[in-house]
Image (cartoon, rainbow, N blue to C red):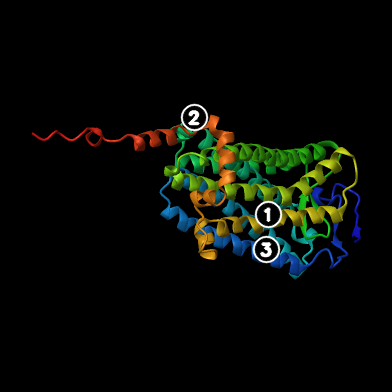
Amino acid sequence: MNASFLPPTNKTPLCYSINSPPFNYTPTIASIHYSAIFSTLGFTSNLIAFIVLVKSFRRVRSGSRSFFLIFLGGLVITDSMGLLVTGTIVVSFYVTHFNWRQLDPNCHFCNFMGMSMVFYGLCPLLLGATMAVERFIGINLPFVRSCSKTKGRSVSMVLMVWLFAGCIALLPLIGVGSYHMQMPGSWCFFNISYEGNDKFFSLIFSLVGLTSITVSFLLNTVSVVTLIKVCCGPARTQRRRDHEVEMMVQLILIMVIASICWCPLLVFIAKTVLSSERVQIRLLLLGIRFATWNQILDPWVYILCRRAVLQRIYPRVNWSRGSIMTLYPSFSDTVRRFTRSSLGSTLGSDETAETEKADVTSPSILSPPPSSP
């Protein structure tokens, strides 16, 4: 893959100072079919997921479930808009082969695409971390969450995540980093370099993404351990805890998908910058394509990983927590012994209270019948 490199002059816009179109294209790397299929598949998947979430939100009665669905809705909107914006630009380029220098002489269009790549890349990772924090508080500090959490506050948290990611995406426009044309000439991204402000912005992008994944992993691990403890409690709270387990399964799958799809690109950027190496275009494109899979796979977590869907696929299996525990009594006994000392904690206090109420027998029933005269 060859490109015409122009020396930076006063007449050369910043975004074209490193790679300047036109490029000689390599079909094995840049393909209209790949971009069109990925964009269409991802946008369709997110549209289906959005419809499923809207229907679920209308039927839901649980407060914690409605808060979780709001975050999922924000994630679906972010993924679908990211695929729509970036996919439209890339596919349009491959169809028309427009000249960036003629269409965008002042780099406005290139800057917009670079901002979109950063914004729609960081938002899913930040939303995943925010959802992990929300579930951690909801499971480990239920009283704090019930007193302070409202649907309006959940929407505000999603908007704050978008605002934070937008502020990071705007940094290259004020001199912290810079957006440049990337080979094979169909997209723009920030300049991955070990020099000056480009190095600083590259590290910001990489560290924010890796930190979000780390926070999600740690908090989700604690929440899962806590749920295992609670699931060994009384079965009378099974229905409510089944919803908690369903949300945690979805959140863990979102975290795993994000880690697999984004870690290669984030680690590659950090390694390239810290080791003062030149960017390997093939590895960069491979990392971008891995990251694109995150936006395609995410919606299928909401579409498929629901008890209603699993019951239709396997109708003979009872997917409730109680039936699963009875299938493996040895595992249930082992976990119960391991977590018995923790069942009196704050998180399990509401289950204990309900058990005590249920075990109290009416005095009229306990009292002996009156003696006959």
Q: x, y percentage for residue 368?
A: 21, 33
Mark 1, secondary structure of its residue: helix
* Residue, disc 1: 294
- Answer with mark 2 or mark 1, whichever residue precedes in sequence: 1
Q: Marks 2/1: CA distance?
A: 39 Å
Q: Tell us which disc is closer to us: 3 or 2.
A: 2
Mark 3, secondary structure of its residue: helix
What residue is drawn where x is 84% and y is 42%?
271
* Observer able to see residue 111: no
In the picture, measured across the screen, residue 226 lies left or right of residue 1, that is left
Mark linked to residue 39: 3
Label 3 Cα neighbours within 10 Å, binned few <14 / some 14-19 / many ≥20: many
In the picture, measured across the screen, residue 89 lies left or right of residue 277, that is left
* Residue, disc 2: 344
- Answer with mark 3 or mark 2, whichever residue precedes in sequence: 3
Q: x, y percentage for residue 359?
A: 35, 36
User: Is residue 107 or residue 291 the one in the foreground?
Assistant: 291
Disc 1 residue type (three-letter)? Asn
Q: Marks 3/2: CA distance?
A: 50 Å
User: Is residue 160 or residue 191 the one in the foreground?
Assistant: 160
Disc 3 residue type (three-letter)? Ser
| Quadrant location of the N terminus in the rendered image | bottom right
Q: Tell us which disc is closer to us: 2 or 1.
A: 2
